[in-house]
Image (cartoon, rainbow, N blue to C red):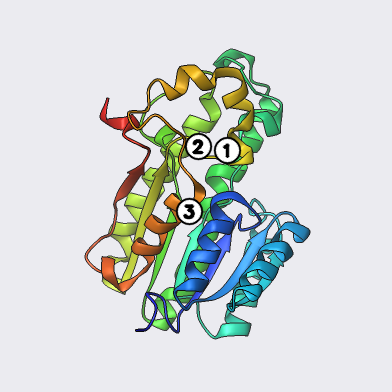
Amino acid sequence: MSGMLEGKSALITGGGGGIGRATALAFAREGARLAIADYSEQAAAETVALVNAAGGQAMSLSGDVTDSSHVQAMVAAVVAAYGRIDCAYNNAGIAGYQVGAAGKLTHEWSDDAFDRMIGVNLKGVWLCMKHELPQMIAQGGGTIVNTGSIAGLVGLYTSSAYVAAKHGVLGLTKTAALEYAGNNIRVNAVCPGYIETKMTEDTMKRRGAELMAKVPVGRMGKPEEIAEMVLWLSSDRATYVTGACYNVDGGYMAI
């Protein structure tokens, strides 16, 4: 039996760890040829090594998703290697602690912290789509999945710029889905809850017990559980799904 992404090529940004790495391994398991992009060249290379060790095929890329020329070069490199981009997972993102804003209220964020958060988590997603979409139009179709968050659906304490960015990602996702449905391009988003990654370590140290009390299943999610949703959305099993934002949150949004 062939894999869900057999013969397809995929670009994953933020693929150097966490959800991105788990998704790369899931995609490889299902037959995709991969391009793993990350701000950290070493992290991308480590994911590629894991994919190759598991019998998959992958190449590593590095660059800044806030720089249009970098993103354009990433897309061009994938097309040069594989001829097309069937699946794009725009996953690169940062958390508040990475811009010095951990635990800060809205008025306490610095201008630089706010701009960096919006730049990576929102503009970065838009730039990826900006360069992926023309290629997908030219080749006759494709799939895009963007990493949203439960923060794209509700407000979260001390996370103002992150919340703003993720709300924006869901808006971009829905609009692009409408605009490119006629080009055989599906655009969806996955909205993780609290997942066991480096990005959540700071928050969990400060407020873990409080937050887990709001999750009906009573635990954090695993990166692999998000990867399975991204895989399905990217596959031909989801051909009638576009413009959707799927929660994978242990029931958090059901409360």
State whether residue 40 is above or below residue 61: above
**Is 134 on the left-hand or right-hand side of 127?**
left
User: Disc 3 marks which residue?
Assistant: 224
Q: Evaluate if marks 2 and 1 touch, with contact meaning CB atoms under 8 Å apart.
A: yes
3 vs 1, front mark: 3
State whether residue 226 is above or below residue 1: above
Between 102 and 164, which is closer to the camera in this rendering?
102
Classify mark 3: helix, strand or loop.
Answer: helix
| Residue found 57% across the figure and 73% down from its top | 34
Q: Which mark is residue 165?
A: 2
Of labels 2 and 1, earlier in sequence is 1
Q: Looking at the image, which residue sits at the far left?
A: 240
Between 231 and 225, which is closer to the camera in this rendering?
225
Count numbered badges in the picture: 3
Q: Which amino acid type corresponds to the residue marked 3 in the rendered image?
A: Glu
Of labels 3 and 1, earlier in sequence is 1
Q: Position of residue 236 (x, y in %)?
A: 30, 73
User: Disc 1 marks which residue?
Assistant: 118
Q: Report, in whole angstroms, how far the alpha carbon at label 2 lies from the one at label 1.
A: 5 Å
Q: Quadrant of the C terminus?
A: top left
| Residue found 50% across the figure and 81% down from its top | 84
The residue carrying pointer 2 sits among few (fewer than 14), some (14 to 19) or many (20 or more) residues within 10 Å by Cα, namely many
Q: Quadrant of the N terminus?
A: bottom left
The residue carrying pointer 3 sits among few (fewer than 14), some (14 to 19) or many (20 or more) residues within 10 Å by Cα, namely many
